[in-house]
Amino acid sequence: MSIGKIPLLLLVSNISLFGFAQSITEESTSEVNLPFRTGEWFEFRIYYGFFNASYATLELSNDTLNGRPVLHAKGYGTTTGLLRWFFKVEDHYDTYFDNKKVIPYWFIRDIYEGGYTKNLEINFDHDQNLAHVNDLKYKKQETFKITDSAQDLISAFYYLRAFYPSEKLKLNESFSINMFFDKENYIFKMKFLGKELLNTKFGKIQCMKFRPYVQSGRVFREKESVTLWITDDGNKIPIRLQADLAIGSIKVDLEKFKNLVAPFVIQFN
């Protein structure tokens, strides 16, 4: 697994299919004030053990797709320093998604990870519940059935921020969303662990703490090996992620940000 990916990619790139206690439904997405806006930008620093392994960025802008206004999110991850000499990573991700429902229309994945490459485009047809996958590397086109409101790897980051069931969520309760990744449908499930005042480089931040379920074995030590902290404010942004891997551990911290939709609240006592 690459350690040059943004936090959400780490969370969902090795998900297996699980049952779920509570799902985010279409009815819950009808009216919402989005916790993000165009111009939002993040930089994350990723540590592998004691090493500062890589950086990743994620930015959001307005765009149009087939004459329709959409939001365009661009993700980029790369290894740095000494690690880059041994394992070069250049990962590019793009998603174009609906600016109200936050469902993806077009997803691009163009990655180079230590000699391994992948170049895919996915066109989502939510009316027919189909995903049209264009594998540019192997010049192969395929169509797959998808579930309702299926998310791609990047749009899921925004969808979770917008629609997770915060008012109904109880301690140790789980919720899930539908995803389509690498030509397969998944259910991505997270458990709410409560709230925590987290010490960060910015100061003390009130956070919601989650436990994403991942597939144990090749990458993660156990299916509950990942912990995620999200700011308990109007932005709902990931501030820290920690994971126990099959070999070693990984930590992801928010390093820089700009153009948030709501104040970034820091507690000084």
Image: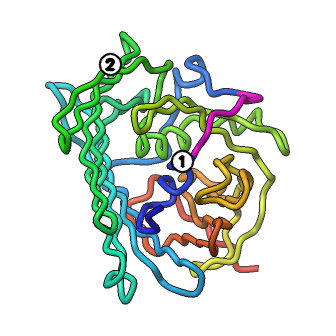
Rendered residue at 50%/38% (across/down): 159
Task: Judge left or right: residue 78 versus residue 161.
Answer: left
Circle nearer the N terminus (2, 1): 1
Q: Quadrant of residue 142?
A: top left
Which amino acid is tagged 1? Answer: Val
| Residue 133 falls within the magenta-colored stretch | no
Q: Residue type at mark 2?
A: Asp
Numbered range of the magenta stretch: 15-22
* Disc 2 target residue: 125
Extreme-top residue of the structure: 128
- 26 shown above or below 191: above
Q: Is residue 227 visible?
A: no
The image shows residue 261 at horizontal and vertical percentages of: 45, 52
Is residue 20 covered in magenta? yes
Judging from the image, what secondary structure is the residue with disc 2 in? strand
Q: Is the residue under label 1 in contact with that under label 2 (CB below 8 Å)?
A: no
Q: Position of residue 13 (x, y in %)?
A: 50, 49
Which sits in the foreground, 174 or 254? Answer: 174
Q: Say which residue appears at 66% left-offset and 39% top-offset.
A: 189
Q: Is residue 261 left or right of residue 98?
A: right
Q: Is residue 156 above or below residue 236?
A: above
Residue 88 sits in quarter: bottom left
